């Protein structure tokens, strides 16, 4: 059995820089026609020049593969209309991180009063630049996403023309909120479709499944699966594939992030097939994103073949999700 996907997209991806970029970018390019590239480098991507130079480094790393890096800026409340107008054509979205909430987010936002964010959000709305949000407070770890929902609602109401993407949603509450506002959309990761907190910490601790937001309860996973499996038009695939070297994961102070880029499509096909909804995968991994972001990605056919695929133990020093396990689909090289 085979499945051909047209221009699959990963609308939330960490490619890092330097040697790590060289390791991981070709792996995404082997499976996807494009990806929304996160700006949380050290220092974060905050200028037009940084965007352009980072994009060049990505293109260099993928060599001659067909793969479009859709670039993002790291949100700052002081961006003004003039600056955003100048950078608009180089980016697809701006990513907002709460300060200190996850990897390399120390320079994020610490005042979430809508008035404090309004000038930048107003300009983004006028210029048609989507806002991507890591929606977590610094409250109790299991409640952070739920506590952030009122902030999403305030922004969605005040800026009805602003496209807002709730990144990597993990809860039923988030799915419900998503449905209440026309201008809210969401990405869903592979790992949050597969795992719950039990898989991370229910037995021996699994550092390679530790990420932010942390995986939640079975009923939350069920709510995510429901909208992903029907390829609801408000949701799209964003892996949040977030590579860290093994010594940063298998360590006290384990870094947050699950590395899924090279296994994402086979693992999604396996999950969608088991649910009897393989025909909806195309929408989930490409068509919905094209509509939400109003983009036309490069044409690229990616063929999946239903043959056993043993996931490598590591890619250089990065351990992928399902390392050493056998998946039922593989990407045709
Ligand atoms: O687990 C995560 N890792 N969550 C994020 O939001 C960031 C990411 C990273 O950059 O490592
Ligand atoms: Zn991320």
Image: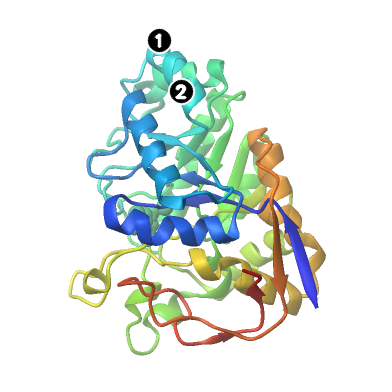
For this orientation, the residue located farthest to the front is: 64
Vertical comparison of 23 with 306: above or below: above
Quadrant of the displayed image that contains ligand 1: bottom left
Left or right side of 76 for 61: right
Residue position for label 2? 121
Vertical comparison of 122 with 51: above or below: above
Residue position for label 1? 82
Percent from the top left, x then y, of residue 323? Answer: 44, 82
From the viewer's side, name the closer residue of 204 and 157.
Answer: 204
Percent from the top left, x then y, of residue 321? Answer: 45, 75
Sort mark 2 into few (<14), some (14-19) or many (20+) by Cα contacts within 10 Å: many
The residue that appears at 47% across and 50% down in the rendered structure is 63
Question: Does the image show residue 200?
Answer: yes
Q: Quadrant of residue 332?
A: bottom right
Left or right side of 72 for 220: right
What is the C-alpha distance between the residues marked 1 and 2? 13 Å
Left or right side of 323 for 139: left
The residue that appears at 59% across and 55% down in the rendered structure is 32
């Amino acid at each position: 059995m085979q499945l051909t996907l047209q221009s699959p997209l990963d609308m939330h991806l960490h490619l890092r820089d330097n040697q790590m970029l060289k390791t991981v970018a070709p792996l995404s390019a082997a499976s996807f026609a494009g990806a929304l590239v996160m700006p949380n480098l050290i220092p974060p991507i905050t200028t037009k020049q940084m965007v352009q130079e980072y994009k060049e480094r990505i293109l260099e790393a993928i060599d001659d593969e067909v793969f479009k890096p859709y670039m993002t800026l790291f949100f700052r409340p002081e961006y003004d209309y003039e600056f955003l107008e100048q950078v608009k054509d180089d980016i697809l979205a701006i990513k907002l991180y709460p300060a200190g909430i996850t990897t390399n987010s120390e320079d994020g936002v610490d005042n979430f009063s809508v008035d404090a964010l309004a000038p930048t959000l107003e300009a983004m709305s006028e210029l048609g630049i989507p806002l991507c949000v890591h929606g977590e407070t610094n409250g109790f770890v299991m409640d952070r996403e739920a506590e952030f929902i009122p902030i999403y609602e305030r922004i969605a109401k005040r800026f009805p023309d602003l496209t807002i993407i709730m990144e990597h949603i993990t809860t039923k509450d988030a799915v419900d909120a998503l449905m209440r506002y026309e201008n809210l959309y969401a990405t869903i990761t592979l790992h949050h479709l597969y795992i719950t907190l039990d898989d991370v910490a229910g037995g021996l601790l699994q550092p390679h499944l530790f990420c932010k937001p942390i995986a939640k309860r079975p009923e939350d996973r069920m709510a995510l699966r429901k909208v992903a499996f029907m390829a609801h038009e408000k949701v799209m695939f964003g892996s949040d594939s977030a590579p860290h070297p093994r010594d940063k994961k298998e360590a006290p102070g384990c870094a947050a992030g699950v590395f899924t880029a090279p296994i994402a499509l086979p693992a999604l096909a396996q999950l969608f097939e088991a649910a009897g909804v393989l025909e909806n995968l195309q929408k989930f991994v490409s068509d919905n994103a094209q509509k939400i972001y109003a983009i036309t990605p490069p044409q690229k056919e990616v063929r999946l073949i239903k043959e056993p695929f043993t996931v490598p133990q590591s890619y250089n020093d990065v351990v992928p999700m399902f390392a050493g396990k056998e998946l039922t689909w593989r990407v045709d090289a």
